[in-house]
Amino acid sequence: MDATTLAPPVRIARAAVFGVFGLNGFLGAMWVVHIPAVTERTEVSNATLGMLILLMAGVAIVGMRVAGPLADRFGSRVLVAAAAGMLSVAVVGPGLATGPVSLAIALMLFGFGNGALDVSMNAQAVHVERAYPRPIMGAFHALFSCGGLVGSLAGAAALRAGWDIRLTLTIAAVLGLAAVAVCVPKMLARTGTTEDPATSFPPTPADGPDVSAAAVARPPRPAAPAASRGTGDSARKTVRRKVFALAAIAFALLMTEGVANDWSALQLREHLGANEATAALAFAAFSTTMTLGRFGSDRVSGRFGPVAVVRWGALLAAAGLIAIVASSWIPLTLVGWGLMGLGLSGGIPQIFTAAGNLGTETAATDMSRVFSLGYLGLLAGPSIIGWLSKPTSLTAALLVPLAAVLLCAWGARVVRPSS
């Protein structure tokens, strides 16, 4: 069976999840591009802003951990509606803030909504992916990157036109709520205890698309892992070990991604003396190959399997890091950052798919644990590199993410589907 034979509700649900991933990237970018304007409006120092961003990240982790059990109980579609609606409204908050306290409250709300949406939309993505004959998770994450690009360009255009930040963010909020109203009703509804579209009962019209076995033809689902079918302590320990292993790989990959996000341009400038415009090309190379790689990772995973995507992707990222550390030539360094983005592009979608398909009745909770530890890596990576760069150098500090991705290559088998 190919995707063209799927029932329309599943294809529509896929488009709806695309929309929410894009919305998440768009709203996040709208906040990021307005950080200088918010800082000026609220008169907070860079040090205070850094603490507030760290507070936002901490609350985002809380949102992730809360969203997992709630999605398991009420269904991921319900949580997507609540979290995406909250995030759309919360994006206005930083524009309305007038001081450190009001900005802190605004960022806490934004962080909580963002964390909850991260978990719930990925849980829904796993639900939709189960109904497809091939992997599609990478494309969802690619749409997140595209949404971020659109948000960055739109925000920059509004700033260039001299629009008031409150007007721009209000428009973003209205667009976000409209997207929620359009996309959420088209998502797959919770109709069974584990949100499995292959075993769910037909929903009522109010529940959304019918994803019953009679409505959607698909190949037989693999049996749940033996660990999930067991009832003893050993079965639960097996699942916990798998969750921890997936979380560790997510931590390492997102730590490396965070290093590229925050330090790529500065590394090129400090190590090779590039001017600011040229240095900016380092992050551009990384983000471009990251987005393109996410669009292609599903096809690679479908042909060679998720283990190959994680293992060879991590090795490709390691090759890029080796080129960056050893290079004394700007073009080669840019190639290194590009290889790093391409290598990292497919790993995280495979990990989230594996976490959502452990065969337990707490799939979203398992995903939230993987998410939260992975997100810690995204936050910790830049800080670790910053600390290490003081006694050594920024380029030498990149040996830490190099070791991390090599460990990911070694442990890639953790994403192998259970039989």
Image (spheres, helix red, strand yellow):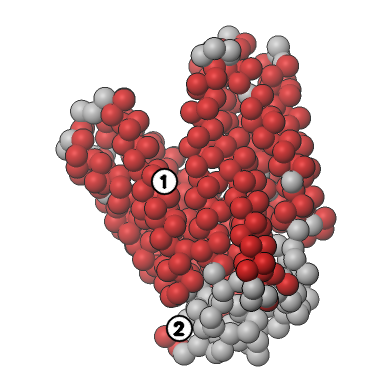
Does residue 176 sit above or below 130 in this rendering? above
In the depicted view, which residue is nearer to us: 303 or 245? 245
Q: Is residue 182 visible?
A: no
Q: Quadrant of residue 345?
A: top right
- Counting from the top left corner in percent of width and height, residue 398 is at 63, 24
Q: Amino acid at mark 2?
A: Asp
Residue shown at 74%/63% (left/top)?
Answer: 417
In the image: residue 311, left or right of residue 180: right
The secondary element bearing badge 1 is classed as: helix
Residue 322: x percent and y percent? 73, 24
Across and down, in percent, residue 79 comes to 42, 67
Q: Residue at x 74, y 35 (%)?
A: 406
Q: Amino acid at mark 1?
A: Gly
Give me the residue at 75% from left, 74% from top: 222
Quadrant of the image for the N terminus? Answer: bottom right
Q: Residue at x 50, y 35 (%)?
A: 380
Residue picked out by circle 1: 28
Mark 2 secondary-structure assignment: helix
User: Which residue reaches farthest right?
Assistant: 304
Comparing 23 with 223, the one in front is: 223
To which quarter of the image does residue 96 belong? top left
Q: Which residue is mark 2?
A: 207
Q: Which residue extends farthest front?
A: 233
Q: Dot 1, how many residues are within 10 Å of its Cα: few (below 14), some (14-19), or many (20+)?
A: many
